[in-house]
Image: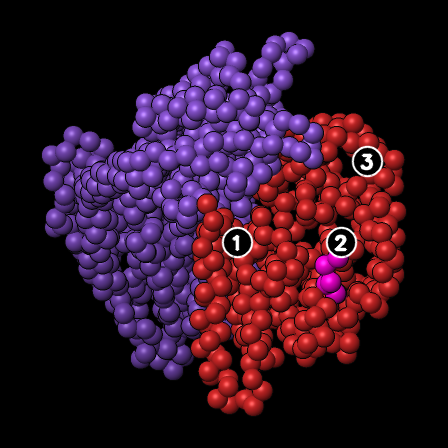
Amino acid sequence: MPRFPSLILRWLSCGLFLVFALTASAAEPVKQASFIPLWLPQAQFAGYYMAAEKGIYLKHGIDLSIIEGGPGRNPSEYLRDGRADFAALWLTTALQRRDAGLPLVHIGQVVQQSSMLLVARKDSGIRTLADLAGKKVGLWGGDFDIPPHSVFDQHGLKVQPVQQSATVNLFLRGGIAAVSAMEYNEYHSILNSGLNEDELTVFPLKEHGANYPEDGLYALETTVARDPQLVSAFVRASLEGWEYAFAHPEETLDVMLRIIKDARLPANRMHQRWMLSRMRALIRPAEGSGVGELSRQDYQVVVQELRRRGLVRAALDYDDFVKGNHALR
Amino acid sequence: MRFAETIGARLILAVTLSTSVIFAGMLGFNHLRSRALIETEVANSAHYLALASANRVEAALSTTARVVEITARQLEQDQINDPRVDPASDRSVRQMLQRTLENNPEIYGTTIAFEPVGSAGAARLHAPYAYRDGAEIKTVQLEAAYDYRVQDWYQIPRELERAGWSEPYFDEGGGNTLMATYSVPFYAGSGATRRLMGVVTADISLDWLAQTIGAIKVLDSGYAFLLSRNGSIVTHPVTDHVMNESIFSLAEAADDTALREVGRRMLRGESGFVPYRGLAGAPARLYYGPIPAAGWSLAIVFPERELFAGIRELTLTVAAIGLLGILLIVLVVVLIARSITRPLHSLAIAAGRMRNGDFDVQLPAQTAHDEVGDLSRAFAAMNRDLQIHIRDLVATTSAKERIEGELSIAHDIQMSILPKMLPPFPHREEFSLFAVIEPAKEVGGDFYDFFQLDDDHLCLVVADVSGKGVPASLFMAVTKTLIKATARMDLSPAEILSRVNDQMARDNDQSMFVTVFCAVLDLRDGALVYTNAGHNPPLLIPRQGPPHYFPKTRQLVIGAVEDYPYQAETMRLTPGDRLLLYTDGVTEAMNLQDELYDEQRLLAVCNELQGEPIFDLVKGTVASIKAFAGTAPQSDDITLMAIEYRGRPSVS
């Protein structure tokens, strides 16, 4: 049964109030914009929610409404249909959509590396990646299976893919030998279902040849062409929101839990805390490209892999695709 | 005496301490033992409570499960044609769903989801879903809403090839209804040709479950909660925990690895009774046991405060009674201690007063038949005897004092009868005389005497009565008086002593006697007539030549035998000659080495003092004796009498 998009209303009303408040004092008119994250509200997107919550978007002249993501809500489709001005996508997904003809461009890279894991139980005898050969492995749909498939190809592994649901219950019940898990989310869910870390064999994809940048910010080419200021303001405000979230973790957790409860989703503080602390490590890696930027090297690695697997046909130039770096300078 | 040093204080301290220690030990043991008993008891009752609750939950769950199983078996038996191939069968499928809802009011919705047919690309999904909308039953096609193949309710039974309950979830409609779905896979064919046809499910509301678990009342503030197969909290008095927290997230938040381990045991379907932190962190006990049908686990929390409230109350009551008992014991000890120390104390006071001579003291009652009573009685007897003894002593002492006083008087009298005027005859130039008596402590019997018989004759007497004391002094007085009364011009010393002897010996019942040297000196020519009745021989100190003793004469003492014929002897003194008369107190004076002064020493002293005046001769001799005796007590009277004959001047 469809959920009523109460959040949109909420942000709209909140935004409208602030529009009046700001237009009274600022010469710059506040612009309406919308953003859809990759998934359900959780600390994975704390930066955007906090930027909205703390008026950071408004400060940058944007009255932003955050559309609740989740199963069945494909952000690229929201972009395509104009239901959202901005979307969070993995680089692999975005490149595929672009190749398929959706004119989207990269405007900011939030998560600089892969945090995807394959997790197996030690007591199922799986100790190395090769042990997965012929086993049932849970893989997400919606392009999230690109990195694990890339790993399997690189290691010449044939596994028995099982499309993975929104939970890890099939893995917990023993229905599959290994499960896809984001380190900041499903991995903690597994731990919080009573499995201890020392009972698990964990394969981080970034250590097995698929360290692909994940959450990035995207917009249609037309949006960037029409209002480059809006785009760069959105990226800057989003990154500022992340800074705020990392600087005020408890307040951020309070806000996220409230939003999660409003969305009638399971709200667990420990889980969100785990997620926020992992996001911090992902967004501020010790080395690599600057915060918000997509390095050319990472871009080339992902494009080559997608082309090798035939998921992308054209060799799209970095500068034709990445339009957001100037916004950060 | 400080309080801590009293017997009473020591007794109270020792008894109170030992009693308290024993009592506290017993109380502690009793408390712990009771707690252990209660714990066992509670563990047992918790076990049955959990079992009963789990059975109720299971019964309800298995009712629904059976309905779904029957539907699945029916689908397998009927070999229903796939509705996607045979639209006619779609109607019967829908009827089946409808009937299920009609017959089972607890089921909220039910679906028969068919495994897609055709290749993956052309997969045709088909899943009619019947559900209640108020009193109506409506049907929708689930495949229109989502791809049910990646829903847990479809995928898990499909992959595991067995029926099962889903994780509880909140109603998709946005309601607050907690739901769970039972899914049963159904197959076509059998053995090697068996293939999955689809999955039948039924959704039930778990509200009744929350009510059932919530209705488990444990004491006042105890409660129960239910964990899903994943450890998620399905029912809990803290509603915010429900489906938000898991036992593992609670353990993580509290950093409680033990709780995490308990959670793992619960998920493994074990049961146990462990310490737990209840609401607001209150210490509690947790009983957990499985609900096998769903793989869930039921936990019952017993707040420790209430669990052991009875015991705490009992312990407090017993402690209060014990305290009263100890106070009572202290009181008894105080009384006993006082019954001992009070008499002792008054005895001590009495003894102190008795030391000061006050025997009229209050003694404690001697009625008790114990050791203190014995002591009191002995003390009273001692007091009595002491008083008698002291009374006797006082009487004896006063008698002795009286006697001593009388003796002293006797001594004075004795001394008073001796001639005192010395030199006695200052107007006489023919002789010079000096005498001294150093009485011993006791009344003795020495005396000397001199008197003129006429102008030309001087009688000299030195005597020593045998024995000492009053009889001796009386005897001496008698002797002196008799001699003086008897002496006449016409009698020689021998005649005088014979008469005196007759008088004395006649009525001498006491068998006392007296040695006497009696002499009569003719002052005209120095002729000396004398009789020595058993007395020491006098010493003649001539003017020229060495002094020498008179020859010893063996005549009997006076008072021994009547009619004894005393003989007189004569000698002549030339002017300048001296006579020294003395008693045995001189020659028998003893020093500390029990040596006698003896006659040789007397002779030597007189030889030295030969040229001195007679006063110095006598005094020097006495000094010599005293020097010899030293600190040795004087045992006898020392009597010395010296006379120097000068001769009658020619002019007269």
Query: Is A203 situated above or below A285?
Result: above
Amino acid on which disc 2 is placed: Ala
Q: Colour of chain B?
A: purple
| Rendered location of residue B367, percent (x, y) | 11, 34
| SS at badge 2 | loop
Question: Local crowd at mark 3 within 10 Å, few (<14), some, or many (≥20)?
Answer: some
Which residue shows up at 88% across the image and 52% down it? Answer: A304
**Spatial separation of the CA atoms under disc 1 and disc 3:** 33 Å
Q: Which residue is mark 1?
A: A269
Give the colour in which the image draws chain A: red
- How far apart marks 2 and 1 lie (CA) works out to 39 Å
Q: Name the residue that disc number 2 marks.
A: A100
Question: Camera-side residue: B194 or A205?
Answer: B194
Observer able to see residue A212: yes
Give the SS element for disc 3: helix
- The magenta stretch spans residue B169: no
Disc 1 chain ID: A
Q: Which residues are magenta?
A: A101-106
Residue underneath mark 3: A129
Q: From the viewer's perspective, is residue B328 above or below residue A269?
A: above
Image depth: mark 3 or mark 2 in front = 2
